[in-house]
Amino acid sequence: MKKLISMLLALVMVLTLAACGGNGGTAPEAGTTEYKVAMITDYSDITDQSFNQTSYEGCMAYCEPNGIEFKYFKPLQDNDAERIAMVDAAVSEGHNIIVLPGYAFGPTIVASAETYPDVKFIALDVGAGDLGEGYVVPENVYCAVYQEELAGYMAGYAAVKMGYKHLGFMGGMAVPAVVRFGYGYMQGIDKAAAELGIQNEIVLDYIYANSFSGDADITAVMDTWYQEMGVEAVFSCAAGAYTSVAEAAAKVGGKVIGVDVDQKAIIDGTYGEGMTLTSAMKGLAATIEDTLKDVIENDNWAAYGGKIATLGLASEDPTANYVQLPMESTAWTEGFTQEDYAALVKAMFAGEITVSNDITTQPAVGYTVNTYANIK
């Protein structure tokens, strides 16, 4: 009997250890840290079809299947104090990885990183200029910025190859990321026009709204562009202000180029099928998923902490990069096919095509550029 009881106790211990040691479908444990992930929206919400929504979906795509606790926090108002308060709230609930999407989080990082040295901050699109002159990125902060000029270049090149000759660019504000998009767009237009021998036929109208939200004033300017000036397609590099561009385009059958994420579904779904030519995208979700996986599963924060990484082309494969056009939803034409796009990316990755990231001087181009004062 004693022998039987001993055997039963041993069996129970084995089963108990197995239950404790299994991860139940969660990410493999690289160390002893139990991670809880939080994301804080900048000032919009997770249905903005832009930075916040894509970042939220990237967090969910990794955390949900791996059993990692995740929650997002939305500031009550658009100011630094509210964003910092949300960091405080997330930390108070035990979150030790916090994802911060957008340049507006620069002051939040400066205020919070030192306060919470044991919390890892993953910031998207937050560069040195957003953090302040002389700021040294601490070991618990990782910032990822993107080569927007490459995505802008692809979009401009595509638009001309698709047959559009009177183009527009509307930036939200003249912040570095937006300017890189715009100046890359200029260079891509120039390259395609030169290849086709039509530089003298190309016109680009260029403006900043000084706002990332659409309104009647912005719509009125876009109405003028599309209806009176003959602009055929506008690169709306202005987050939520795409609504004003799309409203104006819809009235005359104009076209729109989206930004940051694939905006075809929201633009075409709301304003008319076939309106979106393409979108100049940044790999926000891929950045989040890749970083969380490496940190949580491989205990590899050392590869990220204290760094500002610039992400762009990682492969000649168009779908494997941190900046790209959407393969499935771009309005491919005989003038610009998926094969043409693949060849373009291959040449860019090989260094055969170079794109300047200088935002201090407008690129020199061989076509007409009309630059206008800010709308607001």
Image (cartoon, grey):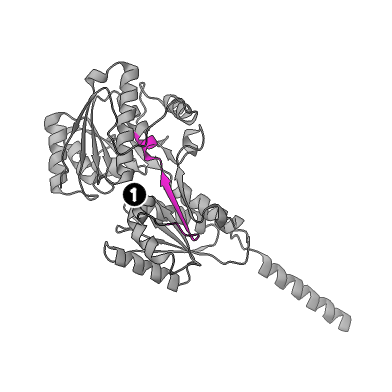
Amino acid type of the residue that numbered disc 1 sits on in the rendered structure:
Ser
Residue highlighted by disc 1: 50
Is residue 1 in view from this perspective? no
**Residue found at x 45% / y 39%:** 312
- Say which element carries label 1: loop
Tell me what residue is drawn at x 32 percent, y 17 percent.
196
Magenta highlight on residue 140: yes
Does the segment drawn in magenta span residue 155? no
Nearest the viewer among 190 and 68 is 190
Q: In the image, is residue 80 above or below residue 179?
A: below
**Image position of 33 (left or right of 198):** right
- Pinpoint residue 237: horizontal percent, then vertical percent: 28, 42
Examine the rendered structure and indicate whether residue 357 appears above or below residue 217.
above
Residues rendered magenta in the picture: 136-152
Which residue, as the protein is rendered here, is positioned at the far top? 197
Name the outermost residue toward the bottom. Answer: 2
The residue under the point 39% across, 61% down is: 109
Residue 221 position, x and y percent, is 14, 40
Q: Does residue 202 appear to the left or right of 121 in the view shown? A: left
